[in-house]
Amino acid sequence: MDGPRPAADPVLPLDVGDVVRLRKAHPCGGREWSIARVGADIGLVCTTCGRRVLLDRRDAERRIVSFVTRAAQGADGRPA
């Protein structure tokens, strides 16, 4: 086979400030998390109790069910 291989999974666009809902509830009962860090690892902060966790991008993308709110976007498409 010649030529480039297609990517296994497309990357989910995540921005600092997005609020996401995860599949399972946190032990405090909260299901909504604010994204605090984006990169190979995703930093999340529980909106209920403030606990901070770090998940690798693959696990975070698998656990995200929906976006509650998206970060404000500037004119250039970057978060404001």
Image (tube, rainbow, N blue to C red):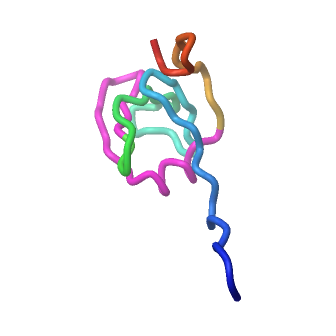
User: From the viewer's perspective, is 67 left or right of 44?
Assistant: right
Q: Position of residue 73 (x, y in %)?
A: 55, 15
Residue 75, above or below 4: above
Relative to 45, residue 80 above or below: above
Residue 52: x and y in percent read 29, 34
Q: Residue furthest bottom?
A: 1
Using residue 6 as the reference point, say whether residue 27 is left or right of it: left
Farthest residue to the right: give it: 1
Query: Looking at the image, which residue is at 64% across and 41% down?
Result: 65
Percent coordinates x, y for residue 18 in the rendering: 50, 24
Q: Nearer the viewer, residue 41 or 33?
A: 41
- Give the magenta range: 43-65
Q: From the viewer's side, name the closer residue of 28 and 56.
A: 56
The quadrant holding residue 66 is top right
Along the viewing direction, whichever of 50 and 44 lies nearer the viewer: 44
Q: Is residue 69 magenta?
A: no
With 11 as the anchor, is 57 left or right in this view? left
User: In percent of the image, x 32 and y 45: which residue is there?
Assistant: 54
